[in-house]
Structures are given as C-alpha cells and as structure tokens.
Image (spheres, helix red, strand yellow):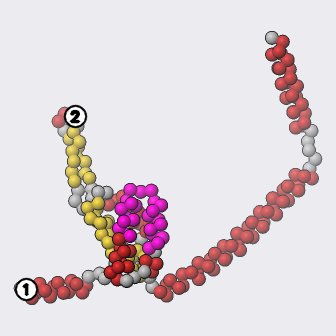
Amino acid sequence: MAKNIREKAAKIAENRDKRPHATAKFVRISPSKVHIVLDLIRGQDYNSALAILKNTPKAASEVLVKVLESAGANAENNLNLSKNDLYVAECFANEGPTYKRYWLRSHGSADIIKKRTSHITIILDEKDKAFVKAEPKKVETKKSEEKTVSETKVKAETKTVASKTEEKKSKPATKTTATKKETTKKAVSAKSKQGGEK
C-alpha cells in the first residue's frame, strides 16, 4: 500500500509542470471580470504584460500585477531565469467558493447576493531563442516600408496644400466683404446715437 502511494507520488512529481508560475487563491473578485484582463496579457512578454496591467483601469489589474510579479520572482530565484526572456504562456481564473448574502425585501422575502471568488494562475515560460532573433528583423522591415509610404503621403499632401494657397492668392479679393463691413459699422453707429439721445 505504502509502496504504491510512493510510486504514484513519484509519477506525479515527474509529470508536474516545471515552468515558473504563481497562484492567488480566494480573491474576492468575479472570474468573469478577471478573464477580461487576462485576455489582454496572454502571449505577451513579461515586461509588456506588466505595462499593460499597470495601465489598465480595471479592478482585476491590481491583483494580476502582484501575481505576475510573483511568477517573475519565482522564475528568477528558483529557476535562475531572466525576466527579459519570459512570456505569459498560460493564464486562467477558476471559480472559487461563492459567499451568499441576503438582501431583505418587502413582504418578508429576500434576494440572494452572490459574492464570487476566483483562483488566479499565471504560468510563464522562456521564449525560444530563434523566435526572439527573427522577430526584430520582421518589425524593422515593416517599419521601413511604413516610413516610405507615410513620407510619400506627406509630400503629396504638402503639394496639394501649396497649390490651393497659390490659387487663393491669385484670385482677386471680392468687394462684398468690404461692403458688408461698412454696413455693419453704419448700423452700430446709428444704434449708439439713438441710445445717447434717450
């Protein structure tokens, strides 16, 4: 009996996930609210995920920052990994126990208030070195193409603006604006005179 238990424990230890992770249990927030924020950081590298969480105005982001930092610290201290080489491989929020509270209503009835809790887990993993080296090259080529396209658009826009200003300068000023100004001045002076006579 004891031998079987030891063998089972050894198998479980072999199959256990060796990746750095952190878990926060019995967090007083609904799992559905946590899922919204977890979807933002899934697959992101450690530093960008931390930046996203710190700038997300959601109630769950404060808790997730602590869990993510804890997972990063576990990776550094326990497995000697660098935080710059990590990314969020998996993150999920399971439902914990629900606390039931009651809200008294009319005619002796009551409504149930469910205060949900969640167990939040974030698992980090090390990036593949070949994948990391290939990424910046792709980004640079896209940026250079975008720059050339944007530069041509800016040049075309400046040309059109310059041609429009030249057209305006070449047209003679109309007399209608001058006559309107004169009539308004006469009307204002007439009103001021009438006010002074009273």
Could you tell whether 45 is left or right of 112 in the image? right
Q: Quadrant of the C terminus?
A: top right
Q: Does residue 47 show up magenta in the picture?
A: yes
- Which structural element holds mark 1? helix
Q: What stretch is highlighted in magenta?
A: 46-69
Secondary structure character of the magenta stretch overall: helix
Q: Position of residue 117 (x, y in %)?
A: 27, 58
Q: Residue 106 carries which label?
A: 2
The residue positioned 40% from the left and 74% from the top of the image is: 88
Q: Is residue 67 visible?
A: yes
Residue 58 inside the magenta-drawn segment: yes
When asked about the image quadrant of residue 142, the answer is bottom right
Q: Which residue is drawn at 26% across and 82% down?
A: 16
Q: Position of residue 182 (x, y in %)?
A: 89, 31
Left or right of 24: which side holds 47? right
Give the mark nearest the N terminus, 1 or 2.
Answer: 1
Residue 108 x/y as whole percent: 17, 36
Task: Bin the neighbour count of mark 1 within 10 Å (Cα to Cα): few under 14, some 14-19, many 20 and up.
Answer: few
- Answer above or below: position of 61 versus 152: above
Q: Indicate the amino acid at tag 1.
A: Ala
* Image quadrant where one finds the N terminus: bottom left
The residue that appears at 26% across and 61% down in the rendered structure is 26
The local crowd at label 2, few if under 14, some if 14 to 19, many if 20 or more residues have their Cα within 10 Å, is few
